[in-house]
Amino acid sequence: MTSTSLPLTHPALLRTSNLIGQAWSAAHTGHRLDVTNPATNTVFACVPDSDARDASQATDAAAAAFPAWSRRTARDRAQIIKRWHALILEHQEDLARIISTEQGKPIKEARGEVLYGASYVEWFAEEATRISGEIVAESVPGRKMLVLKEPVGVVAAITPWNFPLAMIARKIAPALAAGCTVVAKPAEDTPLTALALVYLAQQAGLPAGVLNIVTASRAKTPAVVDAWLADSRVRKITFTGSTPVGKHLARESAGTLKKLSLELGGNAPFIVFDDADIDAAVDGLMASKFRNGGQTCVCPNRVYVQAGVHDYFVARLSQRVAALQVGPATEDASQIGPMINARAVEKIARHVADAVAKGAVVMTGGERVRLADGPHYYAPTVLTNATPQMALSCEETFGPVAAVFRFTDEAEVIRDANDTPFGLAAYFYSNDVRRIWRVAQALETGIVGVNEGAIASEAAPFGGVKESGYGREGSRHGLDDYMHTKYICQGLLG
Ligand code: SIN
């Protein structure tokens, strides 16, 4: 593979090796992992297929770098992170092109993802300088009682493919800001964005060993992750991905009692009450459901519409969805790109077929789209008559399918919305102030969008409850997740 297969203004951003310490290196085995363009299903790059030895070597580097990095002043760390932020913005177009090519995100959205990810980097550079402890009023004369915040140590960051830049940025930036050092493993489908991001951190002046990254295939990932799980020097694991993998990490990290942040699966309800502004609700659903082709943990999976506005809402929604442009991710006009791989398209097709067999009605879409450049496209779809018996009601479809359920009263819809083991995000539209507070409090999720479909922000705590995990990313809570609390009690002061 040469850089000409992915034309970039700054070809050095196309990294195809691990970064361990200060060396860009191949996997111990010499094995390589193919990176595929999901639109064309063709291989356009290769990266190391690492194993436990690479993972442990990365931990050696991170553990060696920790004492010096954690002792630097917060302002010093912040300055390097700010330079990293500036470099990310400077290379926005190249980074967006890498995201689009390896993940299939429409280029306009990919540019947005670069800014979104960069906003976390800037935020945590600023938060670094605000880390502070407490002096507690002493309960015994002659004592001083102090509370310090300290970095937890080496952090392992394991990230997903759907936001290949933003998800790793919002884990690495707070870790570095807190004074932790990092070993990272991006998803096998999208390693190049993460490698480019780490390269820019190196260019920003991050000392050797502070940030290390290894890439691995699905088959080798367990070896890499197991090496980190077993290593007592790794003090925290931060993971975004599926609930079964999150549970595995929770079980297996018990041996060394690591701190965990788990951002896991969702099954978000989106509720439209009769008293809502219906056009605003359609706008909100378009923004949240069809972002990244519906391949987003927080995107609505179940759309509940009250009987009085149901038909109008469905008509407006179907019109908007039918007008979405499906096309190659690198084209400016595309609004829905290819799905990540064949498995993803098969799951969407299976969910739609199951729903139709159980009585759902296809208002628009409902089929694969055959484009000249490849097989991984699915038409943006609206289904009505959805019921809890359908697979799409209890599993994340992770595709451009809006399944509409009709409901009659508030108590019924709250019960149905909460009838899931997941609890990441929920949305509802209403203009009744009393109902707004009642429903926002009744929904069992970590995030609630009220009359708003775009809820993510670097300034807000992102994370779930129930089997959607624990820990928060973004906001000051996102920094706390990388620190522990130390109490110092000094006596003999009387
Ligand atoms: C995710 O899909 O896990 C993250 C989406 C977001 O940050 O909005």
Image (tube, helix red, strand yellow):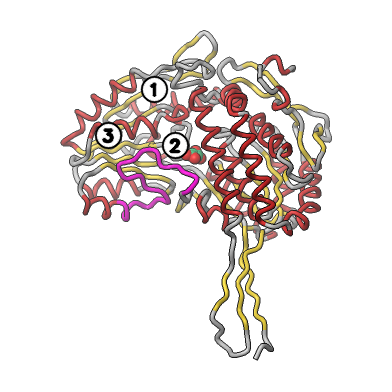
Q: Position of residue 381 (x, y in %)?
A: 36, 23
**Disc ID at residue 473:** none
Q: Which region is colored magenta?
A: 440-459
In the depicted structure, whether residue 337 falls above or below residue 483: above
- The magenta stretch spans residue 210: no
The residue under label 3 is which amino acid type?
Ala
Disc 2 designates what residue?
A: 396
The residue under label 2 is which amino acid type?
Glu
Question: Which quadrant is the N terminus positioned in?
Answer: top right
Is the C-beta separation of discs 1 and 3 under 8 Å? no
Q: CA distance from mark 3 to mark 2?
A: 24 Å
The residue under label 1 is which amino acid type?
Pro
Report whether the residue tagged 1 is closer than 8 Å to ligand 1. Answer: no
**Quick one: label 1 or label 2, which is nearer the N terminus?**
1
Secondary structure beneath disc 2? Answer: loop
Secondary structure beneath disc 1? Answer: loop
Q: CA distance from mark 1 to mark 2?
A: 16 Å
Disc 3 designates what residue?
A: 280
- Nearest to the eye among marks 3 and 2: give it: 3
Question: Which quadrant is the C terminus positioned in?
Answer: bottom right
In the depicted structure, whether residue 471 falls above or below residue 145: above
Residue placed most toward the observer, 50 or 291: 291
Q: Position of residue 82 (x, y in %)?
A: 63, 43
**Disc ID at residue 380:** 1
- Asked where in the image residue 147 lies, by quadrant, the reply is bottom right
Callout 2 crowding tier (Cα within 10 Å): few <14, some 14–19, many ≥20 = many
